[in-house]
Amino acid sequence: MEQIAQDSRLLAATSALAAVGVAAVSFKVFSFLKTLLELYVLKGVSLKKFGAGNGSWAVITGASDGIGKEFAQQLAKNKFNVLLVSRTASKLETIAKEIGDQYGVETKTYAMDFTKGDNADFARLGDLMSNIRVGVLVNNVGTNHDIPTPFTEESDKVIEDIIEVNVMGALKMTKLVLPQMQTNRSGLILNLGSFAGMVPSPYLSVYSGSKAFLSTWTQSLAKEVENQGIIVQNVNTYFVVSSMSKIRRPSFLIPLPKPYVASVLSKIGLACGSNVPFTSTSYPSQGLANWFMNLLSPNFWITQNFNIQKDVRRRALRKRERLAAEAASGSKTA
Ligand SMILES: NC(=O)c1ccc[n+]([C@@H]2O[C@H](COP(=O)([O-])OP(=O)(O)OC[C@H]3O[C@@H](n4cnc5c(N)ncnc54)[C@H](OP(=O)(O)O)[C@@H]3O)[C@@H](O)[C@H]2O)c1
């Protein structure tokens, strides 16, 4: 009798464990199929919802190069007027003219240095936006450590610049445009995040922390305004060819800005491989990489990342030494 009771308890425990196992595997299979569907089949929220083609404006920070310039071009192609913001007035004017000529939209430019964190700059930009209807804000401007650097060796200036540009810049820009989006009950705010905000990056700790801030803040704000017709989304980006990444050639995982931005704009509101709320990893190979990364422990990725950054630092220091030696021998022969 006792034996039968023990056997039935064992059977119940084994069945419960098997059910948990099946549920866990089914959940992973479902989440993988959902990721494939979102990356390759489904379309995101249409840009028309945010005023494309009806006189609305898109405001893009860091719009004179790389990913930001591409956002400006593709949003203009989708018939948004564009307000371009970055440091260098001459670059902004050239791009604004090209965009105006090519897409027949209105353009405005505003040159400011986000590292200064000057409230008067933001106030003037606010005035410029007070009589236009802003449908889209792309908080794209960002800055990084020059090379991977141990925290205590990093200069105060680099640390302050990263926080001023990546964190305060996004907060202040959003504070300028969100009230009118709330009045209009329509708006899209894209915050350029990074895998470095998802996987802590030793030796790039301040950049990594700034992007983690953006991720958490985006999620909180997105929830606050989701019932007001406004989408706030963290754009979870792995590498893209640009001057910031210092990568010149595209590869399977590393696109040029053009296909990268096209993927972002066509997948608004879809997670595409990310398991973080209000976050999208829209470029197909990066979305798949994100999904697979979530299978392994964060500890594993931090260690991998640290090894990579140590190696990048070693090579960057060797390059600096070589350039310094070349410069020294050049100045001797001159
Ligand atoms: N590229 C990547 O692999 C990658 C990966 C993950 C995340 N991201 C994020 O994507 C965003 C764009 O990166 P990107 O690679 O396209 O950069 P990028 O090619 O270096 O372009 C940066 C843009 O920002 C402007 N800018 C830089 N510092 C500024 C400042 N202090 N004040 C005002 N404007 C400034 C630059 O123009 P001026 O020099 O004329 O001002 C330029 O228009 C960043 O937020 C970055 O963190 C990039």
Image (cartoon, helix red, strand yellow):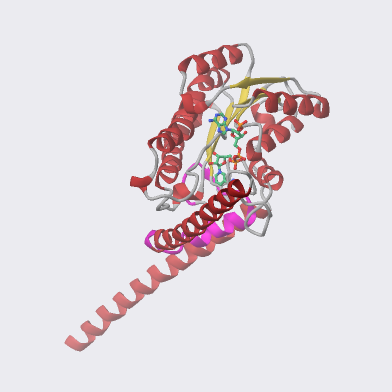
Seen in the picture, residue 11 relative to 67 is either above or below; the reply is below
Q: Is residue 188 magenta?
A: no
Quick check: can you spot residue 1?
A: no
| Vertical relation: 146 (above or below) 104 | below
Q: Quadrant of ligand 1?
A: top right
Outermost residue to the left: 2
- The residue located at (42%, 43%) in the rendering is 212
Nearer-the-camera pick, 105 or 11: 105
The quarter in which the N terminus is drawn is bottom left
Q: Position of residue 223 (x, y in %)?
A: 45, 34
Residue 287 % position (x, y): 58, 54
Judge left or right: residue 110 versus residue 313: right
Closest to the observer: 14 or 39? Answer: 39
Residue 291 in sight here: yes
Q: Is 297 part of what is drawn in magenta?
A: yes
Quadrant (top left/top right/bottom left/bottom right) for the C terminus: top right
Q: Residue at x 55, y 13 (%)?
A: 124
Q: Is residue 268 left or right of residue 213?
A: right
- Drawn side of residue 66 relative to residue 174, left or right: right
Q: Tell me residue 190's x, y (percent).
A: 56, 35
Please report the bounds of the magenta region as a residue range. Answer: 275-299
Viewer-closest of 282 and 227: 282
Q: From the viewer's perspective, is 326 left or right of 16?
A: right
In the orientation shown, which residue stands out farthest toward the front? 333
Q: Where's residue 26, x and y in %?
A: 49, 65
Instruction: Please give the name of the residue rendered at 69% of the width and 24% of the height, measured from the top-left corner.
Output: 90
Q: Is 310 or 263 nearer to us in this picture?
A: 310
